[in-house]
Image (cartoon, rainbow, N blue to C red):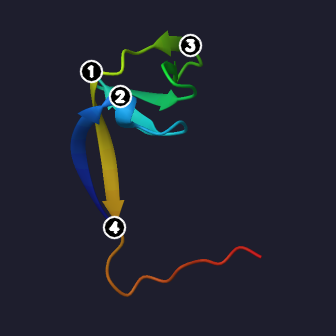
Amino acid sequence: MNAETKQTTFGSLPIGSRFHFRGRPYHKIARNMTEDEEGTGNIFMDQTVVDTTETSEPSGGSAVNPS
């Protein structure tokens, strides 16, 4: 699996996204709210630039079907 870091704005991330800001990991829990790794809530402005990690599966990967 390859990971690529990409910069985007906080406002463009869907709720539930995980991202990094100034080297710290965060989890988007509402439109402008996040939670850090210690469970502390934070407010982010929509135009704040954050780092996301996109992962790409190698070709030939298999999909898992939960049933």
Query: Disc 4 marks which amino acid?
Result: Met
Query: Going 46% across and 12% down the picture, which residue do you hit?
Result: 43
- The numbered dot on residue 40 is 3
Mark closest to the chain's N terminus, 4 or 3: 4
Circle 3: residue type: Thr
The three-letter code of the residue at mark 2 reads: Phe
Q: Residues within 10 Å of mark 1 (few under 14, many from 20)?
A: few
Seen in the image, is 67 located left or right of residue 3? right
Where 6 falls versus 65 (above or below)? Answer: above
The amino acid beneath tag 1 is: Arg
Mark 4 surroundings: few (<14), some (14-19) or many (≥20) residues within 10 A? few
Alpha-carbon span between mark 1 and mark 2: 13 Å
Which comes before the other along the chain, label 4 or label 2? 4
Kindly identify which residue carries mark 4: 1
Residue placed farthest to the right in the image? 67
Tag 3 near tag 2, CB within 8 Å: no
Q: Using the image, determine if residue 27 lies above or below residue 17.
A: above
Image position of 41 (left or right of 22): right
Sequence-wise, the earlier of marks 1 and 2 is 2
Q: Bin the neighbour count of mark 2 within 10 Å (Cα to Cα): few under 14, some 14-19, many 20 and up.
A: many
Label ID, residue 10: 2
> Which quadrant of the structure image shows residue 66?
bottom right
Q: Position of residue 2 (x, y in %)?
A: 28, 63
Picture residue at 32% right of the left edge, 41% below the top:
52
Give the percent coordinates (x, y) of residue 33.
52, 19
| Badge 3: residue crowd in 10 Å (few <14, some 14–19, many ≥20) | few
Measure the C-alpha gap from mark 3 to mark 2. Answer: 18 Å
Tell me the SS state at disc 4. loop
Look at discs 3 and 2 and give the one toward the viewer.
2
* Disc 1 target residue: 22
